[in-house]
Every structure is written in structure tokens, then in C-alpha cells.
Image (spheres, helix red, strand yellow):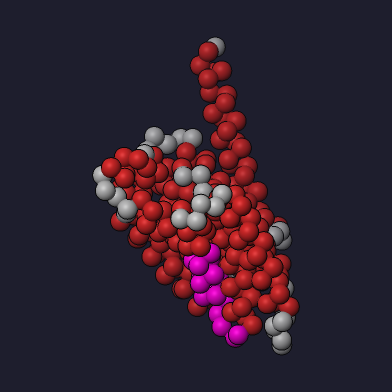
Amino acid sequence: MSGILADLAQHGFLRNALLGGILTSVVCGVVGSLAVVRKMGYVAGGVAHASLGGIGAALLFGASSLWGASAAAVAGALLLGWMTLRGGENEDTAISALWSVGMAAGVVCLSRVEGYAVDPSTFLFGNILLIPADELLAAGIIDAAALAVAILLYHPFKLCAFDEELARIQGLPVAALHLLLMTLLALVVVALIQVVGLLMVIALLTLPAATARRFSRSLSGMMVRAAAVGSACTAVGLLVAWDRNLPAGATIILLAGGVYFGAVLLQRLRPHRGER
């Protein structure tokens, strides 16, 4: 433990990684809880893979990959929302189309980038230890904006999540709120890409929230617990990966998955203990 603390004090990039991971986990706890109760987990996967097209296009034209991913993710989320709300398209089909087209566009664009050593695995699996200070600041701004909107519109989001018909009766703009939630989800996905990569976005967005849901009686309590679980898994997973020379993103996800399955097992065992 003393060795890890010494490394934290010595290496700025390790502190950046820890701070970025915790900031992302907090906003994931809030937005991820809304995604879980609305069963939108796989929407995150479609948006994440759509963002690869934006990353590739940004690098191809010499722009920031973060802003390219943000633009593509938001555009993909809004397109997906429009296709399902107004276009009458089945959500699974729309997600599959967005997923495959985004990946294909990203691969094509990355293959055309000249003078840049592009390693697609960095985007697929993430590398939290390579977060530069400027991108950490930009991700922090994105996270803060998403968190602020989710908190300010907590009650409308909550009503739409649990009783959409009542929300319509009360005059809430249900379709607009759905598109706004999709946009928040897209921004969180962008922040997650650097932490755990495209392939593991769904896990970090949903596992802490799914764990928290088992021990929460309210949506607000679920959000707080999900943020705490996600932050703990990210911090511990990152430091274990650093100490043991393991892939950080995969280690974080394994830890989050272990906590989730442990929570499921604990809840299954509780009734049997009460019957004895």
C-alpha cells in the first residue's frame, strides 16, 4: 500500500487517471441509474460504437478525438431517439445499425490517417493512464454539465422512468426528455471511452447502477450508491492494475462485475437465512 501511495505522489499521470476515473464514475452513477431503470443499457453500446466514427474523422482532419467522439455520440444518440420515437423503427434494429455503421466508419477513417500511429485497441479497450491534463479538464466539464442537467431535471426524469403515461398527463415533454437523456448518455459514454474503452462502456455504466438498485428504495438513493460503488471499483481497480501490471480498464470491469455478482448472491441468500 505504501508503494502505491508513493507512486501516486510521484506520478502526475497516475493522479490524473485516478481523478478522471472517479469523476467519470460519479456521473455514471447518476446517468447510469436512469439508463438502468429505463432499460437503456444497450443504447450506450450503440452510441459508443458510433463515436468511433467521430474519433476517426477527427483524427483524419487533425481535430481533437475527444470533440470528434462527443459530436458523433450526441448525433448518434439523437438519430437513434428520432428513429425509435418518430420513425417507428424497432430499437434493437436501430442500435444494431448505429453500432455497425459507426464501427465501420471509424475503421475506414483510422486507416486513412497519415503520419499518426493509430492503435485502434486504445479506443476499444481504453487506457486511463494516458489521459492528458487538457482532456481531463474537458472530460470534467462534460461530466459536470451532464451531472447538473440530470440533477436539475431529476423529478421529470424520474416520472418519465416510472410512469410515462402520468408524465404525459401532467404535460411533461416526454419525447424531449427522452432525447435529452439520450444526449446525457452520449456525453457520459464519451467520458468512459478513455477509461475503459468502447467494448466495456456498457459494463461500467450499468454494473454499479444494477448493484445499487438491489439495495435502494428510491432513485436518488440508487444514484448515490451507484456513484459510490463505481468510484470505489474504479479507484481500487486502477491501483491494483498499476501495482500488478494489469490492463486497467479490464481490471476495473472485473472488479465491478465481481461486486455485482456478489450483491446478487448476497440478496439470494438473505431469504434462506431468515427462514432458519
Which quarter of the rendering shows the C terminus?
top right
Residue at the spot x=46%, y=55% of the render? 86
Residue 221 seen from this side: no
Residue at the spot x=59%, y=55% of the render? 95
Q: Eyeballing the image, is 61 above or below 15? A: below
Which quarter of the rendering shows the N terminus?
bottom right
Identify which residue, 259 or 186, lies in the foreground: 186
Q: Does the magenta stretch include residue 15?
A: no
Residue at the spot x=51%, y=52% of the render? 88
Give coordinates of residue 58: x percent, y percent: 59, 79
Is residue 232 toward the left or the right of residue 176 in the image?
A: right
Q: Eyeballing the image, is 113 above or below 28? A: below
Magenta span? 61-76
Residue at the far top in the pictured view = 276
Is residue 241 toward the left or the right of residue 69 in the image?
A: right
Residue at the spot x=61%, y=78% of the render? 57
How many marks can you see?
0
Q: Eyeballing the image, is 231 above or below 265? A: below
Residue 114 falls in image quadrant:
bottom right
Give coordinates of residue 31: x percent, y percent: 44, 53
Identify which residue, 239 or 42, lies in the foreground: 42
Is residue 222 toward the left or the right of residue 91 in the image?
A: left
Residue at the far bottom in the pictured view = 115
Identify which residue, 53 or 29, lies in the foreground: 53
Give coordinates of residue 224: x percent, y percent: 41, 47
Residue 47 seen from this side: yes
Q: Main secondary structure of the magenta part?
A: helix
Q: Does the magenta stretch include residue 70?
A: yes
Give coordinates of residue 217: x percent, y percent: 39, 34
